[in-house]
Image: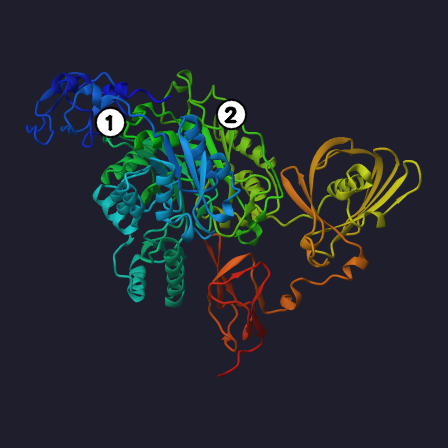
Amino acid sequence: MIPSQRSLARRHLTSAIARTAGPATAAVAPRTFLQTHSRTSAARIGSVNTSHSNHWIHRSFATESLNSEHTLFTDYIYVTKRVHCEADTRRRPHFDKILIANRGEIACRVIRTARKLGIKTVAVYSEVDKDSLHVNLADEAYCIGPAPSAESYLRMDKIIEVCHRSGAQAVHPGYGFLSENATFAEKLAQEGLVFIGPPASAIVSMGSKSESKNIMSAAGVPCVPGYHGDNQDPTFLYEEAKKIGFPVLIKAIHGGGGKGMRIVSTQTPQTFQEALSSAQRESLKAFGNDTVLVEKYIQHPRHVEVQVFADSHGNAVSLWERDCSVQRRNQKIIEEAPAPGLTPELRADLGAKAVAAARAVNYVGAGTVEFIFDNDTQKFYFMEMNTRLQVEHPVTEMITGLDLVEWQLEVAAGNFLPLLQSEVPLVGHAFEARIYAENPRNNFLPDSGRLLYLSTPTPTTVFATPFSADQLSGDNTSGNMSSSIQPSLRIEQGFTQGSQIGVFYDPMIAKVVVHGRDRTEALRILRKALDEYHVVGVATNVEFLRTLAGNTAFIAGQVETGFIPNHFDELFPPVAAPAPEVLARAGLFVALRDNNSLPASKQSPWASLTSRRFGGDAYERTVTLQTESDPDAQAIVHIVSATPDIFNITVRDAANRTTTFSSVSAHLTSPTALSATLNAELTTTTIISQPPPAKVPVSRDNASTMERLHIFNGGQKITLVLSAPKWLLSLGSDVLGAAAAKGALKAPMPSLVVEVKVKVGDNVEKGQAVVVLESMKTETVLRASTSGVVKAVGCKNGEMVEEGRELVDIEAGVPEQS
């Protein structure tokens, strides 16, 4: 519940101030800072300006003892207006209707809170998102353009038009898109609409990394050494980088989410210039500005950020910190709160510096102050401030029991912050794991496609659970007030089974959020939840996240931003051959399914060619399976049944080892679940069949042209290919044709061609950049795999290409001399 504004105002004004200032005084406003970390009994003398005309209180006062959990930190109280106390402290009502200028899980997240508060919601969507979950959840929905963001979600005019058509009074920008666009905030104000976010001036100040660092330095917030100026001459920037000392970080001044960011470790002009050009190009495309700064790169950093909140009455609080150190491509994939290993003193200092950062720009609303924490020196440095709600905000909600979207709506309506700093809980520990459509074993390249199957663990809560008074007894900076809480699981997602993951937007599918009494318990809940998160249709990072959550160093809290490369071998162990038990279950699933257990339409088209029936219940079936990566690694599963649901199974794996399972009891409990007793152990295994695409010739070397079985077994997803008969394979052809020839560069995923760097006849060296692609806002550089001569170019700048398309063909050999 949000406390009444009257009680909040009284809480903010000490009794001494109230006695001195009189009943006509407005609430404490921007120049008042209330310290809430300690009590005091010492008398304090204050004096204030004598001019009524500029709304300053002009009386002196003394406090003998402030019997509250805060002491006045300044000698001056600024009054925004002199009105009757009842009018000033009255809580303003929420909006009747808001528009959400976003998509996916964050749009769904905002809709849930709005619905809880009785606020109607308006969704906007692009043409490809017409069947999206956020469109179905909102009270109203309007199409605002084609799939590209520049033609839909970034169209300010379209969004404002929908506001007027629908009667929406305010706009929640979510994150990404227009969430940190000062022009958008200004345009909304000009149209009489409320931007549920900070003022445009704060967005401008903190949106520029160079300007923000100057502001932070002036406010006493420590910053990383570097060059933050306007001179963008490449030679000048290289000289500045040498002064700073390599390694350096090139970073877009208007960047975020890892975009426009490059680490340069080698002190050579060519390496620096290539990284600079790439960062500037990516920044220009993502943010419309290619200005960068250059900073010292901390060798063993952690990414620690503080959630701050401020209202328009001058109050600001820290809602504690999060650790977001484990990243790939400079983007977070797992976050936790509070950050492990911080002392209460360091936590308080971080929070104070973050609040100082917010105050320095007269911030209003939800914001995140990001710090680089040096593991070697235990010092922290200001990195940037994100002037929006973060993707990872749920972990903060879980440890505080608060709804941050509700706080955003309160503040945007002009109300006071619901809590003082001393009242903000810190209970237990929380993790968030981001589920992405990407292939971790292929450099985390994004994937696209339809979610053919989606099964998630059952959530225990939709919102963070508010804490009772009993649960809040103790020191709220230590995170130990957790003995009586119930562990919880929450899932934030914007997709359902059947949804399409496209190439135009970020590939995040969902967020798995858990809360436990301590870090150990929270990690245990997270591992179990990831075990139960099953996706078929696109590659995902679920199994990688499960491995990460079970990593010894991660469990010990030994995190840093280089965690993944530093623990690469542990996080990416060699892919083991499927165990005989897994092969036996896969074979049983196929045999039971094809033996009239399901309607004929579900049967394998060549099931009758590999099975025999001897009369009565006698049945025999041979199933040939192979892995996706190696068509030669075939396993043979021979199944014989003399009585219903009892089988004798012989498995010969790819290494020609034989395993026998006798008197196996098995049956299908559903079209996707096999119950079987192997080695006296009863297990239920989820197995999802993915049929081959229609009208695509079957190819032995292309697993996607044959039926695939996705087996979820003990936290692992094992994909096996159900081999087609040899006669059918002989009719097929490789859909990629001769593109597999050495020297041919193919698109690793559906992509936009950003730049073709070569032409026919060019000489290229091995490792030379040839084509630059972009997919799901991520830039990928394809390099020559061999030295030689360009014989063919199969793409052009600005063209959309499908996965597997041959882009450039290089004839291997010594480059021709010109």
Residue 245 location (% of width, % of height)? 33, 58
The residue under the point 42% across, 28% down is 399
Mark 1: amino acid: Gln
Which element carries disc 2, helix, strand or loop?
loop
Residue located farthest toward the right when viewing the structure as drawn: 615
Q: Is residue 337 visible?
A: no
Which part of the image, by quadrant, shows the N terminus? top left
Residue 612 location (% of width, % of height)? 89, 45
In the image, residue 357 sits, relative to residue 420, either above or below, namely: below
Q: Residues within 10 Å of mark 2 (few under 14, many from 20)?
A: some
Q: What residue would you read off at disc 2?
A: 487
Residue 231 location (% of width, % of height)? 26, 61
- In the rendered structure, find residue 35 and report the number of the disc placed on it: 1
Q: Is residue 458 visible?
A: yes
The residue under the point 74% across, 54% down is 633
**Side of 404 relative to 760 (left or right):** left
